[in-house]
Image: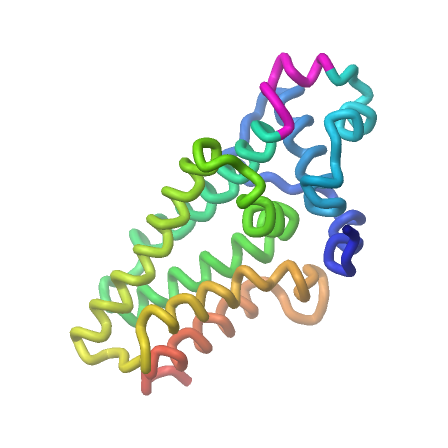
Amino acid sequence: MSTPTRSRLRAQPASLPPSAPSDGTRRRILETALQLFASRGYHDTSIRDLAKVLELQPSALYAHFASKEHVLAELVRIGHEAHHEALQTALKESAPEPRQQVRALVRAHTRTHALHPQLAVVVNEELYALTPELAAPAVALRDKSAALLAEVIERGVAQKSFSPPHPRVTAAAISAMGVRLPYWYEQGGALDVETLAELHAELALRMLGDGAAR
């Protein structure tokens, strides 16, 4: 079913992170599927639809992916992997103090969702169309990413840097700021990605009860 968000995503070129496969045909399939899944929805896109846009016979797709579900599973894995790697890099490059680590994590979380809105929508909305077996790699990465923020918040509470009313609920709210970006944020407007990332970091620290946040 088309929604304002999906209609807007239809007009945008597909954007995969650098870690996605570079092989020509396989990448073309993933990019095309990403655009169709984001704009139409996974269930409303058929293998024939995908093959038509690619100007391939449906049978030719099966040389690269066993099924439409396997195409989705690869996109979801790529999205979660790129997100997790961005968070890990942000932590490694951050100072060890919890406030700075939260800033780094939230900035990275915001950037990945703002720069790859189609992938963010597919990853977050279509994951549940997968069988548990095919979803497992992405779910494991998602849980590891959530644990990175949870651990920093837990350490900040222990050090009395943070005083959230409920750490787990606050962590979920912080994550939701990034997840919701594709539904309202558009690149190229008055608010650039880096400014947005900094605003989200400030909001996250305020939610955590950090008196040092501006």
Residue at position x 56%, y 36% in the image: 75
Q: Is 182 placed left or right of 12 in the picture?
A: left
Q: Dominant secondary structure of the magenta stretch?
A: loop
> Residue 73, image x and y in percent?
54, 34
Instruction: Name the residue at 22% across, 75% down.
Output: 157
Marks counted in the figure total: 0
Q: Position of residue 2 (x, y in %)?
A: 79, 53
Tell whether 106 sits left or right of 179: left
User: Residue 27 colored magenta?
Assistant: no
What segment is highlighted magenta in the picture? 59-68
Location of residue 147 in the rendering, given as x and y in whole percent from the top left corner = 31, 55
Seen at 57% across and 27% down, the residue is 70
67 is within the stretch colored magenta: yes
The answer to which image quadrant residue 162 occupies is bottom left
Task: Name the colour scheme.
Answer: rainbow
Foreground pick, 92 / 175: 175
| Residue that appears at 78% across and 60% down | 4
Q: Is residue 78 above or below residue 200?
A: above
Decide if residue 161 is on the left or right side of residue 206: left
Q: Quadrant of residue 7?
A: bottom right
**Residue ranking furthest to the left:** 159
Vertical placement of 144 versus 114: above or below? Answer: above
Please give left or right for residue 24 compared with residue 211 in the image: right
Quadrant occupied by the C terminus: bottom left
Is residue 42 shown above or below 94?
A: above
